[in-house]
Image: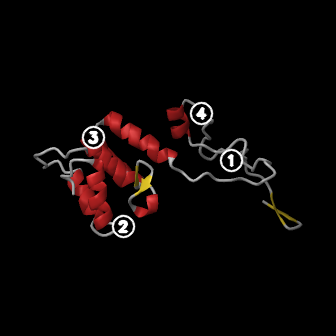
Amino acid sequence: MLEATTPWAFVGYLMNTYKERGEGFHELVNILTSKDRVNPIPCMVDKVRILLIGKHEECVVLANGNTWMPERKMAREFEKVIGEAAWTSIELQLNSCVQIHVYRESDIPNRHGHCNSNPYIPNKLRKALGMPLLPECAKGSAKKGPLRIGNKLTR
């Protein structure tokens, strides 16, 4: 499967072998990121992108087209294998493949100031897209005051 010379050949093998990222999938990823590999894997960047995104050229090929964001350690392994520029491109695509949350129809901001006209977008994605960053909140900076439960005021 990993020796397939084109992304579509890889997709064919992948769809025939795996429907989800369950049994056997992690062994495939471990082989892909192995440092002991002598021969290079053809179309490596495309194969990593397909495994993580679950799609190839907008065609669903794995896990119903759902993305898989690997943990930090695994992400570093992918970056070592395919290079920083290719990994950054895939990571940006992974972060961009998010379900869009629809806020209340009235467009009244929630307690964090977000609404349909001002949705929350993480700073990591904002930076990659060239958008202005949101201010970072310092830990423990939330105002603590009296809490009203029903008609009672508690401290």
Distance from disc 2 to disc 3, alpha carbons, whole Å, reads 24 Å
- Three-letter amino acid code at disc 4? Leu
Instruction: Nearest to the eye among marks 2 and 3: give it.
Output: 2
Distance from disc 4 to disc 2, alpha carbons, whole Å, reads 38 Å
Instruction: Nearest to the eye among marks 4 and 1: give it.
Output: 4
At x 67%, y 44%, the residue is: 119
Distance from disc 1 to disc 2, alpha carbons, whole Å, reads 45 Å
Which tag, 2 or 3, sits closer to the chain's start? 2
**Closer to the camera in the image, 11 or 65:** 11
**Closer to the camera in the image, 72 or 55:** 55
At x 61%, y 51%, the residue is: 100
Instruction: Nearest to the eye among marks 4 and 2: give it.
Output: 2
Task: Find the residue positioned furthest to the right.
Answer: 151
- Three-letter amino acid code at disc 3? Ile
- The answer to whether 1 appears left or right of 93 in the picture is left
Picture coordinates of residue 116, whole percent (x, y): 72, 46
Instruction: Please identify the quarter of the rendering in which residue 67 is found.
Output: bottom left
- Tell me whether the residue at label 4 lies in contact with that at label 3, contact meaning CB atoms closer than 8 angstroms: no
- Three-letter amino acid code at disc 2? Lys
Identify residue for label 2: 19
- The answer to whether 97 appears left or right of 54 in the picture is right
Q: How busy is the neighbourhood of tag 3: few (under 14 within 10 Å), some, or many (20 plus)?
A: some
Identify residue for label 3: 82
Mark on residue 133? Answer: 4
In the rendered image, which quarter contains the N terminus? bottom left
Picture coordinates of residue 88, whole percent (x, y): 39, 37
Identify residue for label 1: 142
Instruction: Nearest to the eye among marks 4 and 3: give it.
Output: 3
Q: How busy is the neighbourhood of tag 1: few (under 14 within 10 Å), some, or many (20 plus)?
A: few
Which tag, 4 or 2, sits closer to the chain's start? 2
Instruction: Nearest to the eye among marks 1 and 2: give it.
Output: 2
